[in-house]
Image (spheres, rainbow, N blue to C red):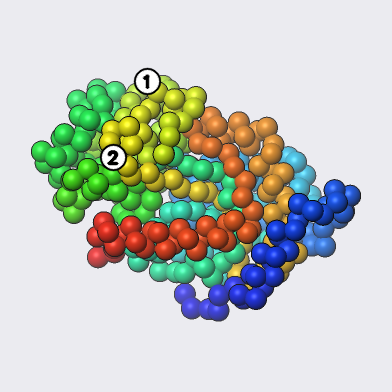
């Protein structure tokens, strides 16, 4: 995927402009934006339905429409899985400069680029907002012999290859790195792990429930509802501190003496070539989504944390997380084979 990156001078200008937004009077902020969508908004999701990325995309769609934030336009969510998210990014690329196309900005894409699995440079696109801080969890069936994370670690130490680990959608992405990182730090040879990829985390969970794998590494929306039904047990979280609600009783890797946090972020990406007013429109609209009760409830019930970080923070995160992911992949030896 070859094309010029988002113009650096425009980025710097937006950084300066965005940092002054809180100082703009409320009456000015309430004025009609300089740009508004005038046709159907296509929200392209690079994974199959059933996982957290799809859940949040549809939650954002619903909020944009119900809060009347898109100039009476319809938001159409289209799942376009394949090639580690490349197919969805190609849709955005073909619609360069068209802010009526949305994509998902996710830590998994940065991990995919770092491993070489995603054959694209995410820096060519425009991250406009981060909306969710995601915790990656490790879970087993209710009847599993692994009652605690310590049991699991002991089993991995005996035979790293004996335990089948479900991840999605591919090896080398965030759900894989989130378990490989603490296992490596715990002294386990991660090159011997038996990692089984599925198209979505929903498929991973189905495989766990069906007895086809031994454990699953996935984010809260996939794991928490099934755990609340009593069918599975959550053993450990990759968050730096314990969560709240359904995750309050779940220990972190740190509590087990393994200082290997892994937090993912989920948000919105725009095509290359969009202008400052288009970015401003989506940033302001998504800020309102992030403050809405229904959105906050959706994210919290899924076991994750609702947040809002706009264009400036999202852009900085993209650059820093990509560097950190590249360093982590090199350390773990998880590059694409």
Report the front residue among 86 and 4: 4
Q: Position of residue 101 (x, y in %)?
A: 64, 61
Is disc 1 placed on a helix, strand or loop? loop
Vertical comparison of 246 with 165: above or below: above
Looking at the image, can residue 304 be seen? yes
Q: Position of residue 332 (x, y in %)?
A: 26, 56
Residue 133 lies left or right of residue 7; in this view the side is left
The label shown at residue 258 is: 2
Looking at the image, can residue 278 be seen? no
Question: Which residue is denoted by mark 1 in the rendering?
Answer: 230
Is disc 2 placed on a helix, strand or loop? loop
Q: Position of residue 41 (x, y in %)?
A: 68, 56
Residue at figure coordinates x 62%, y 34% from the top left: 296
Residue at figure coordinates x 65%, y 76% from the top left: 9
The label shown at residue 306 is: none
Vertical comparison of 226 with 289: above or below: above
Residue at figure coordinates x 49%, y 27% from the top left: 244
Figure quadrant of residue 117? bottom left
């Amino acid at each position: 995927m070859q094309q010029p990156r988002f113009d650096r001078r425009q980025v710097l200008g937006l950084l300066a402009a965005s940092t002054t937004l809180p100082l703009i009077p409320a009456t000015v902020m309430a004025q009609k934006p300089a740009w508004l969508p005038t046709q159907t908004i296509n929200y392209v999701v690079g994974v199959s339905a059933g996982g957290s990325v799809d859940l949040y995309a549809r939650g954002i769609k619903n909020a944009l429409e119900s809060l009347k934030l898109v100039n009476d336009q319809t938001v159409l969510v289209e799942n376009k899985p394949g090639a580690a998210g490349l197919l969805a990014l190609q849709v955005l690329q073909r619609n360069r400069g068209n802010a009526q196309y949305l994509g998902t900005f996710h830590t998994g894409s940065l991990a995919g680029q770092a491993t070489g699995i995603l054959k694209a440079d995410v820096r060519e696109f425009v991250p406009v907002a981060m909306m969710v801080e995601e915790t990656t969890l490790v879970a087993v069936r209710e009847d599993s012999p692994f009652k605690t994370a310590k049991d699991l670690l002991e089993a991995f130490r005996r035979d790293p290859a004996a335990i089948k680990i479900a991840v999605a959608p591919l090896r080398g992405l965030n759900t894989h790195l989130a378990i490989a990182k603490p296992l490596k730090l715990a002294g386990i040879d991660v090159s011997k792990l038996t990692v089984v990829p599925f198209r979505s985390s929903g498929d991973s969970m189905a495989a766990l429930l069906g007895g086809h794998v031994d454990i699953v590494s996935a984010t809260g929306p996939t794991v928490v509802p099934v755990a609340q039904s009593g069918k599975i047990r959550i053993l450990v979280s990759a968050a730096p501190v314990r969560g709240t609600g359904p995750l309050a009783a779940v220990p972190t890797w740190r509590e087990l003496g393994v200082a290997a946090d892994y937090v993912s972020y989920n948000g919105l990406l725009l095509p290359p070539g969009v202008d400052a007013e288009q970015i401003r429109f989506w940033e302001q609209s998504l800020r309102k989504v992030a403050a809405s009760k229904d959105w906050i409830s959706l994210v919290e019930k899924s076991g994750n944390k609702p947040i809002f970080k706009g264009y400036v923070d999202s852009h900085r995160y993209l650059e820093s997380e990509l560097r950190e992911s590249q360093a982590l992949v090199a350390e773990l030896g998880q590059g694409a084979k």
